[in-house]
Image: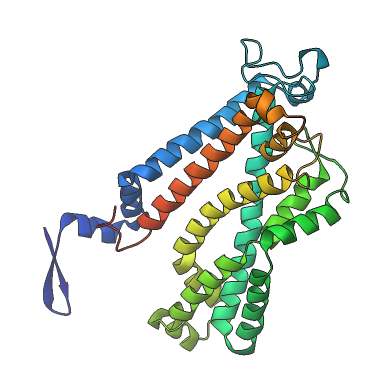
Amino acid sequence: MTTVDAASTPVTLSSEEVEAVRSPLLTVLRRLIRHRAAVFGFILLGLVIGYIVVGSFVFSEADANFNDTSIRLQPPSVEHLFGTDRIGRDIMARTIYGGQISLLIGVLAMLVEVMLGTAIGAVAGFYGGLIDAILMRLTEAMLSIPSLLLLLVLSKFFGNKIPTVEMFGRSFSGSVIVIIIIIGLTSWMGLARIVRSNVLSLKETEFVLAARALGVPNRLIIWSHILPNTMASVIVAATLGVAGAILAEAYVSFLGLGVQAPTASWGNMLTEAQEFQIIKDAPWYWFFPGVFILLTVLSINFVGDGLRDALDPYSDKKV
């Protein structure tokens, strides 16, 4: 036990409370480790990422795109562990490279969402008045439009406008860039409202009022004082945003408006599997990409739930 004098009044703190004061990061990590679902999510997500990374050293992108119609729709075997697709491509190799694209879309679309949502929410909450009214009406207008419908329309219109891009030794169809931008531009609204509500409460705190009294510019107050204190909400929203982006990509790819050939993704693999009665006659075709989408989204949601509780200062009784 440790005794701390505060305003000449002795306050007794337990050893855990003293450590929490000294190291907030360790406190968050301890809560996260005690959160069983989050630990399970981290392990599951690590296995999926490990499968994608290690698999890329076993199979090349050429292997994933190589087709041999003489072995089309072959069930899982020793030679092809996940079977083959309708033109004889190895499904295991395609889930590896398709997973890279799906995760890339999820992460980059999340970054677009976080940058837009955080910037708009922070500016609206800090400045208030007419700026707040305009930005929040824009946010509400975006929320009133079904995001999936908007995503489908924009994907249809812009999907074939950008040529295939060579990057990091890989070929990316232009549709990948379009999907990343569109998902990011249609998913920032919820985060903007969360950040705005946090900023509205933070801008009236004493440390922000003191910074204003000292003449600190508004942009520095937002960047140095307000945003660091709302990062907990941003981190949780960003984590869940990755899962949402992966699902959104799967939706539009399943409808044929997402990632286009020759680039593979888990979503467009499911699109191929719905043709020619393959769903019934070759269940391995859709099972493996579907399972990877399920496991990835589930693990990310578990991690997001754990981060939410770990970053909550009142969560010790809940974890």
Name the spot of residue 277 as percent of width and height, x first. 73, 29
Q: Which residue ends up furthest to the top in the rendered image?
A: 78
Q: Considering depth in this image, is 66 or 23 the residue closer to the camera?
A: 66
Q: Quadrant of the N terminus?
A: bottom left
Q: Is residue 234 left or right of residue 165?
A: left
Question: Residue 99 vs residue 228: left or right?
Answer: right
Type of colouring: rainbow
- Locate residue 26 relative to residue 141 in the image: left or right: left
The quarter of the displayed image where residue 207 is located? bottom left
Q: Position of residue 102 (x, y in %)?
A: 66, 41
In the rendered image of this protein, does residue 292 appear above or below residue 72? Answer: below
Q: Nearer the viewer, residue 106 or 297?
A: 297
In the image, 41 versus 26, the foreground residue is 41
Q: Determine the residue positioned at 64% across, 66% down.
A: 116
Q: Residue at x 79, y 58 (%)?
A: 153
Q: Which residue is depicted at the point 71% across and 34% down?
A: 269
Query: Can residue 35 be seen here?
Result: yes
Give 124 or 133, whichever is nearer the viewer: 133
The image shows a total of numbered marks equal to 0
Q: Is residue 294 above or below residue 230?
A: above
Q: Residue 12 is drawn in which quadrant?
A: bottom left
Residue 217 appearing in the image: no
Q: Position of residue 262 (x, y in %)?
A: 81, 34
Figure check: 162 above or below 6: above
